[in-house]
């Protein structure tokens, strides 16, 4: 499975961005999907997850501001990010899991200016 993320950029605090990740997978609908982020000097952390059945979970720091969704028809997973804060600045990675196998995208940089 190859994952291609896009949509990062520079935005002012309070603004919005939508990240998109497209997967080359013949059975995209069985994958558990997620977005992670890694800020400079920090460990990679889970931001949002969506299961194959559509169950969503969010990190406490982004709940009520971010929304993850998936479109099994076109093999994409989206992350809508609203009310962005400077502390959201990081490289964002999409992630797919099937059983014990994990796949990572290349990352897209989100920079939030104050």
Image (cartoon, rainbow, N blue to C red):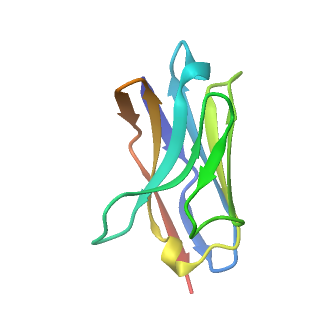
What is the x, y in percent for residue 60? 58, 67
In this view, 87 is above or below 27: below
Query: Image point 42% across, 49% down: which residue?
Result: 107
Residue in view at x 61 percent, y 28 percent: 52
Q: Which residue is pictured at 60% across the width and 34% down the height?
A: 51
State how many labels appear: 0
Relative side of 114 to 70, left or right: left
Q: Quadrant of residue 16?
A: bottom right
Give left or right: position of 78 versus 106.
Answer: right
Looking at the image, residue 104 lies above or below residue 90: above
Position of residue 32 relative to residue 27, above or below, is below
Q: Quadrant of the C terminus?
A: bottom right
Which residue, as the protein is rendered here, is positioned at the far left? 41
* Of 62 and 73, the residue lying toward us: 62
Q: Nearer the viewer, residue 103 or 13?
A: 103
For the point 59% across and 78% down, the residue is 85
Query: Which residue is at the far top?
Result: 26
Q: From the viewer's perspective, is residue 40 above or below residue 97?
A: below
Which quadrant is home to the N terminus?
Answer: top left
Please tell me in which quadrant of the rendered image residue 64 appears.
Answer: bottom right
Question: x, y (%) of residue 113?
Answer: 54, 81
């Amino acid at each position: 499975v190859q994952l291609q993320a896009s949509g990062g950029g520079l935005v002012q605090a309070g603004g919005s961005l939508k990240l998109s990740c497209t997967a080359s997978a013949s059975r995209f609908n069985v994958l558990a999907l997620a977005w992670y982020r890694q800020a400079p000097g920090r460990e990679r952390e889970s931001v949002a997850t969506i299961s194959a059945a559509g169950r969503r979970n969010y990190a406490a720091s982004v709940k009520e501001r971010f929304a993850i969704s998936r479109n099994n028809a076109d093999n994409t997973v989206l992350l809508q990010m609203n009310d962005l804060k400077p502390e959201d600045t990081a490289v964002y990675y999409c992630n797919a899991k099937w059983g014990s196998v994990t796949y990572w995208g290349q990352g897209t940089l989100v920079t939030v200016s104050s």
